[in-house]
Structure formats: structure tokens, C-alpha cells
């Protein structure tokens, strides 16, 4: 069995490349440290697309993640990772990270003792080689160049130029140290961004074609994201910009959840965004922590009744269990001039604000409610019930929006009651003040009486 040796990268990435394709029977091994080293990245670049930079490169990677080493196959455009075999399910290994294209055409990632952690499942399909196309599509092909497997069919958080996404497919992005994640989804009537938390799902941005036209697939062109119907006719396009440089990729950010279209700038030699779905920090779903409010100054402020006094570093949800199905008494706290960027909540119409609050109080899984009202010809009343307190932002007062948060009953009263220490200080201050007043008053009375006696004596002598 042949062995391809490529540049092995420890902690730092050096550029190294091998053959333009990997053929059946080839095996590449990457050593993994015996002891865990935080921040370690070992990477071997195997192939590139042989085009003007930034070009596509394929790498075998071993990376330190949360006390373990992850083994994955990756595709880079310049220094940007645009595809990763372990995006949804990481393969953890020890000692060694192996990539093998078996004799029967199955591409596999292996650990010690040939333990298989990832595979393409293409055995017996006549696969002849693995190669990277000029579009960045990583493919397994047979002797007639027919594609048997391709990375374009397994999108991660990046969509490349020329790539298509059909209805019911999506991009997914995972923020670090968070149980929530973002998705960019293609649906029949719209494309949308979603915040996912457990089984909960709320959209925070969407685009719908005019005239209620249905979408069959989307494709990233050189000028924007194009939407097509079932007749392959373009029905809409999200314009990126009028820049001369063509678009290179679309990405769903794992930090912000924002959707961006990117081009390569020869001047800065970096990728720059020419379009972003959300241009304001406060329109992002996780701009602040849960129970935090994004203000007009793009800063985060906790709901005051929920924070410890003079303790702005505490979590905004301190004192709130967010588990209200145990029979505890609760009440609604109304926040003026506050709304939520999250959509698709359970909605009721033609209800009053009081009824809206009651609906949330009666549902133990409801944690917040948004009451919307309008006057005049467009008069309406809507109540949206949420099971997640996130995406809260400050809005102009008088906008007809009332955001209400469920809190344990008495939380607000206890917060407003001065503590024992405060009462002691107040009593001491009052007593001290009275003593000072009495002392000063007594001295003033003494000097006045003495002056009167002196004046009386002078008069008698005269």
C-alpha cells in the first residue's frame, strides 16, 4: 500500500502540497500528541486546485478540542475553512489521524487499530480518485470522471460560488460555549435565519420572493444569491454589491449568526463582506445574554429587577430558573420600550394586554410575551408567546410594543424592599441627625439667653 507524505504542521500552519489527486489504495497518517495540548493544530495539506490565489486546498487535520483531539478532512479557500467533515459530528482520536481511500473506493478517517470514525460510504461504486475542483467541490470520481460523492451535497456553514442548495436544506453554525445554534434554511416560500435552542426554533431574518412565488433551489452567483423556481427560472436575487470583484462565498457566522456575502480584495489580500443580512448589533439574536437588553448604544443591560444590586457582572437571568412548571407562583414584569427580534412565536390576535399576560401566566412553558397594538385604519392587537428570553432590544417608546417577562412572584417586591442593612443605616442617620439638631439648638438657646442677660445688665447700669 502506498504512503503519501505531506507537510505535517505542529501548532503553526506551513504551506505544503502533494499530488493533484489521491487514488485508491493511498493512505495518509498524521501523528497526534500523546498528551493533550490546548491550542494544538496538526495539519497536512494534501491537494490544491492549482489556480490563482486564493486557491482551494485540502487538508487532513488533528485539532485540540475540549480535552480531546478531533480528526477531520477540511477544505480551505486561502486561510478560510469552507468545509469540514466533522462539522456536525466530530471524530475524536488518539495517537494517529489517518485518511485512507480504500481499494474498493470508500474514503475513510481512522484512528488507532483502524477504528473508522467517518466515511463516504462509496464502496463498490467504481471510485478511482479523490480530487478538488476549481469550484472548491471535493469529489470522488470514477474512471469516466462521473461524481460518486461530493462535499457540495453536505453543506456546513459556508456556501461557495456555483454551489446550489435545494429546498429543505440548510447551513448550520455552532457558537462556542453555547447550547444554541444558528441555521440558514431554504423553504418553499422564503429563505430565513433561525435561532435554535433545544427543540425551540425562532427566525430572526427572512426574505420572501414577491407575488408569493415558490422557491425550488438557490445558487450563489458572482453578484448575489439567486433564487430559482421549479422551471429553473430566476425569480429573485439578493444583491451583494456592484463591486468588480465576484463573490467567493456566503457564510453563516458562528459568533453572531449573521449571514454575509464575501469577495476577495486584492488590495487588502483578505476576504471582505459586501452584504450582511443584519447591519445592527441589536438585530442579532444573541447580541446579549438571555434576559439581557440590547440598548440604543449597542450595549447590553440586564433587566434591573433580576440583577443583584450593584452587581452588574452577574448573569442577567440570575434568580430566574426558567422552569415554571413546578407549581411556583409567578407574575409578569412589563418592560416599556422593549421588543424582541425573534419571530415565529405562538401568536394570538384580538386580545388585550391583560389577556396576553394571562395567556403566558397560564402556560408554564411560556417565559415571555410580546403585546403589539396599532391604532387608526391599521388597528390591531397581537400577542406573541415565547419559550425563550433572547433577542431583546430597546425600541422607541410609544411604538405600540409591550414586552413582558415571567418572574417568580415577589421577586420585584423583594428587590424594591430595602435590606436590613439599609434600614439600620437609615435609622442611624436619622438618630444622628436629631442629636445634632438638638445639640445645635441647645447651644443656640444658651448663647441667646446669655446675650439677653448681658444686655439687661448694661441697661440697668445706665
Image: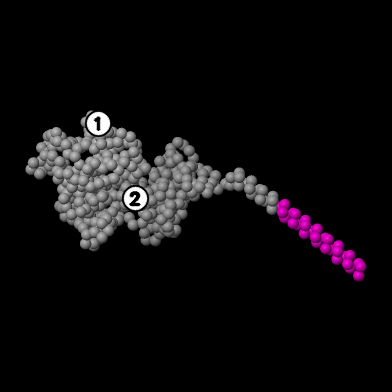
Q: Is residue 261 magenta?
A: no
Mark 2 vs mark 1, foreground winner is 1
At 24% from the left and 45% from the top, the residue drawn is 83
Residue 306 percent location from the top left of the image? 49, 46
Distance between the Cα atoms at labels 2 and 1?
37 Å
Marks 1 and 2: in contact by CB < 8 Å?
no
Going by the picture, which residue comes out furthest to the left? 144
Q: Nearer the viewer, residue 460 or 415?
A: 460
* Residue at the spot 33% in from the left edge and 46% down from the top edge: 195
Residue 204: x and y in percent read 33, 51
Compare marks 2 and 1 and give the one earlier in the sequence. Answer: 1
Horizontally, residue 145 falls left or right of residue 395, namely: left
Q: List the residue tagged with mark 2.
A: 256
Between residues 344 and 451, which one lies in front from this camera angle?
A: 451
Q: Residue at x 38, y 54 (%)?
A: 282
Rendered image: mark on residue 412 = none
Quadrant holding the N terminus: top left
Reading the image, the residue beneath label 1 is 112
Local SS, label 2: loop
Q: Which residues are magenta?
A: 434-462
For disc 2, the neighbor class at 10 Å (few under 14, some 14 to 19, many from 20) is: some
Magenta span dominant secondary structure: helix
User: Can you say whether 133 is above or below 458 in the image?
Assistant: above
* Rendered residue at 7%/43% (across/down): 144
Query: Does dot 1 land on a helix, a strand or a loop?
Result: helix
Asked if 295 appears above or below 170 in the picture, the reply is below
Q: Quadrant of residue 127?
A: top left
Q: Position of residue 88 (x, y in %)?
A: 27, 40
Identify whether 440 is placed above or below 92. Answer: below
Tally the numbered discs: 2
Amino acid at each position: 500500500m502506498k504512503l503519501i507524505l505531506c507537510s505535517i504542521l505542529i501548532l503553526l500552519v506551513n504551506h505544503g502540497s502533494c499530488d493533484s489527486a489521491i487514488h485508491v489504495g493511498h493512505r495518509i497518517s498524521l501523528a497526534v500528541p500523546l498528551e493533550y495540548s490546548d491550542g494544538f493544530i496538526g495539519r497536512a495539506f494534501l491537494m490544491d486546485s492549482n489556480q490563482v490565489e486564493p486557491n482551494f486546498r485540502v487538508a487532513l487535520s488533528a485539532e485540540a478540542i475540549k480535552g480531546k483531539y478531533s480528526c477531520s478532512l477540511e477544505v480551505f479557500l486561502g486561510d478560510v475553512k469552507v468545509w469540514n467533515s466533522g462539522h456536525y459530528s466530530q471524530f475524536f482520536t488518539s495517537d494517529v489521524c489517518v485518511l485512507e481511500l480504500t481499494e474498493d473506493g470508500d474514503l475513510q478517517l481512522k484512528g488507532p487499530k483502524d477504528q473508522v470514525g467517518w466515511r463516504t460510504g462509496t464502496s463498490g461504486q467504481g471510485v478511482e480518485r479523490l480530487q478538488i475542483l476549481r469550484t472548491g467541490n471535493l469529489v470522488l470520481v470514477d474512471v469516466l470522471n462521473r461524481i460518486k460523492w461530493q462535499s457540495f451535497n453536505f453543506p456546513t456553514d459556508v456556501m461557495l460560488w456555483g454551489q446550489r442548495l435545494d429546498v429543505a436544506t440548510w447551513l448550520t453554525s455552532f457558537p462556542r460555549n453555547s447550547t444554541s445554534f444558528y441555521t440558514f434554511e431554504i423553504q418553499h416560500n422564503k429563505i430565513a435565519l433561525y435561532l435554535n435552542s433545544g427543540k425551540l426554533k425562532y427566525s430572526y431574518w427572512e426574505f420572501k420572493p414577491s407575488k408569493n412565488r415558490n422557491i425550488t433551489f438557490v445558487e450563489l452567483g458572482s453578484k448575489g444569491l439567486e433564487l430559482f423556481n421549479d422551471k429553473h427560472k430566476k425569480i429573485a436575487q439578493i444583491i451583494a454589491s456592484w463591486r468588480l470583484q465576484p463573490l467567493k462565498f456566503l457564510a453563516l457566522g458562528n459568533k453572531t449568526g449573521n449571514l454575509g456575502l464575501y469577495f476577495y480584495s486584492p488590495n487588502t489580500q483578505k476576504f471582505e463582506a459586501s452584504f450582511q443580512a443584519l447591519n445592527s448589533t441589536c438585530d442579532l439574536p444573541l447580541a446579549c445574554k438571555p434576559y439581557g437588553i440590547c440598548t440604543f448604544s449597542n450595549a447590553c443591560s440586564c433587566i434591573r429587577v433580576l440583577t443583584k444590586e450593584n452587581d452588574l457582572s452577574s448573569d442577567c437571568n440570575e434568580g430566574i430558573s426558567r422552569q415554571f412548571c413546578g407549581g411556583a407562583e409567578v407574575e409578569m414584569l412589563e418592560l416599556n420600550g422593549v421588543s424582541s427580534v425573534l419571530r415565529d412565536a405562538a401568536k394570538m390576535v384580538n386580545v388585550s394586554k391583560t389577556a396576553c399576560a394571562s395567556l403566558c401566566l397560564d402556560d408554564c412553558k411560556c417565559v415571555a410575551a410580546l403585546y403589539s397594538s396599532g391604532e387608526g385604519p391599521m388597528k390591531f392587537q397581537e400577542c406573541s408567546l415565547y419559550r425563550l428570553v433572547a433577542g431583546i432590544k430597546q425600541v422607541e417608546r410609544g411604538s405600540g410594543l409591550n414586552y413582558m417577562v415571567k418572574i417568580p412572584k415577589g421577586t420585584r417586591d423583594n428587590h424594591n424592599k430595602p435590606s436590613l442593612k439599609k434600614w439600620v443605616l437609615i435609622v442611624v442617620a436619622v438618630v444622628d441627625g436629631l442629636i445634632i439638631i438638638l445639640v445645635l439648638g441647645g447651644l443656640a438657646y444658651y448663647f441667646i439667653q446669655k446675650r439677653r442677660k448681658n444686655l439687661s445688665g448694661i441697661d440697668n447700669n445706665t
